[in-house]
Amino acid sequence: MLPSSILGRKAPALFRTLGQQPIRAFSCAAGDASASNRRLLIFGAPGSGKGTLAGWLGRDLNAPTQADVEPCTASAPGLTALSSGDLLRAEMRAGTPLGQSVEALINSGGLVPDDDMVKLIAGQLAAMDGSNWLLDGFPRTLGQAMALDEVLTSLTPSRQAPIDYVIHIDVPSEVIVERIAGRLIHPGSGRIYNRTFSPPKVPGVDDLTGEPLVSRVDDDPESVRRRLELYAQTSQPILDYYMDRGIVGRFTGPTSDAIYTTLLPQIQEILAPTVVLPSAEDLTCAATAHQVSA
Ligand code: AP5
Ligand code: MG
């Protein structure tokens, strides 16, 4: 097995030259997955398209491949997206103590206290350790960013860096308010639609489940104004925190579609080295994978 210091730096040539499909890794891999998985953040203003883009990445990077039908062949590495807002809305729907205590705050556009957020996210991170993941909406304060580092370092002390990459979505503020006004969500899954930009096939109904779509309570103009203000006050120190490490990629454009054309290849490139292989048995797998992808 390759040492974890190599994994996550540069994949060996054998694995980088598998056909022209750099996003492929190996489903038959063995190794310390929690030290080589990719940990990404998506960061941007309310309504900048974080949830939309995270959803598209999850969809495209988790597409079924040959590996799903043949064991020991190449497969997409996958990316699990986790939205802090979706988690909080699920708590509110379930009427948990946390959901009840934060409901008024969220609906008015305020921020949930750091301690509650860190506890909520830390529980999820432990479960996701070992897979590639993307956090949407966390951290939102410098305190959360520092706490996240601590949680991740304690989860996997062997890693060189707690976070690998931060996607910074930078969208002109004038388009944001209009976008949010048209947003509809499917409460059960968090799937996002927009009345004009990406309407459901049947008005008011989720494409996959047929269940009703709703507007978010915190999407009323006054709450949106407060959320944008809070973002303006809190975002720069967080960006600076990660920019000092050289791990921030800024993506800007008039639409999520335009941003996605540069975002997707970048994330594919970042996920590509999540190859955990070579034992003798693994090399057999690699040969098979090469034939499949060539
Ligand atoms: P959260 O759910 O994270 O909300 P947010 O950060 O305010 O971001 P949004 O979900 O509103 O926007 P988005 O960037 O995901 O945009 P989307 O893709 O939907 O958090 C909600 C609340 O929870 C917070 O206010 C806070 O109270 C609390 N909270 C969460 N995390 C917290 C934390 N860490 N600490 C403390 N409190 C926390 O797109 C927006 C709209 O634009 C959609 O309608 C979409 O369809 C549309 N759209 C997307 N792309 C385009 C396009 N190209 N053209 C036109 N429309 C488009
Ligand atoms: Mg969102």
Image (tube, grey):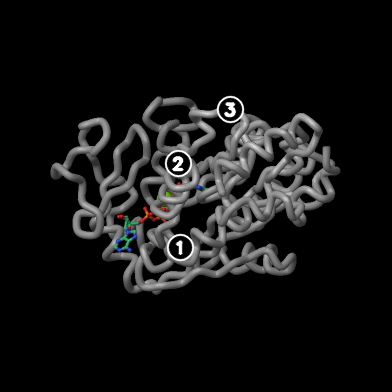
97 or 268: nearer the viewer? 268
Q: Residue at x 32, y 70 (%)?
A: 175
Q: Is residue 21 left or right of residue 284?
A: left
Q: Residue at x 56, y 56 (%)?
A: 20
Per the image, label 2 sits on a secondary structure element best described as loop
Residue pointed to by mark 1 = 45
- Of the residues shown, which amino acid type is indicated by label 2? Ala
Q: What x and y, as percent, mark residue 132? A: 61, 43
Q: Is mark 1 within 8 Å of ligand 1?
A: yes
User: Which residue, as the protein is rendered here, is positioned at the far left?
Assistant: 203
Residue pointed to by mark 2 = 63
Q: Relative to 195, does residue 82 appear above or below in the rendering?
A: above
Whether tag 1 and tag 3 are in contact, CB under 8 A, the answer is: no
Disc ID at residue 223 = none
Residue pointed to by mark 3 = 71
- Of the residues shown, which amino acid type is indicated by label 1? Ala
CA distance for labels 1 and 3: 42 Å
- Of the residues shown, which amino acid type is indicated by label 3? Pro
CA distance for labels 2 and 1: 28 Å
Residue 173 visible? The answer is yes
Precedes in sequence: disc 1 or disc 3: 1
Whether tag 2 and tag 3 are in contact, CB under 8 A, the answer is: no
- At label 3, counting other C-alpha atoms closer than 10 Å, the crowd grade (few under 14, some 14-19, many 20 or more) is some
- At label 2, counting other C-alpha atoms closer than 10 Å, the crowd grade (few under 14, some 14-19, many 20 or more) is few
- At label 1, counting other C-alpha atoms closer than 10 Å, the crowd grade (few under 14, some 14-19, many 20 or more) is many
Q: Relative to 158, does residue 176 appear above or below in the rendering?
A: below
Q: Is mark 3 within 8 Å of ligand 1?
A: no
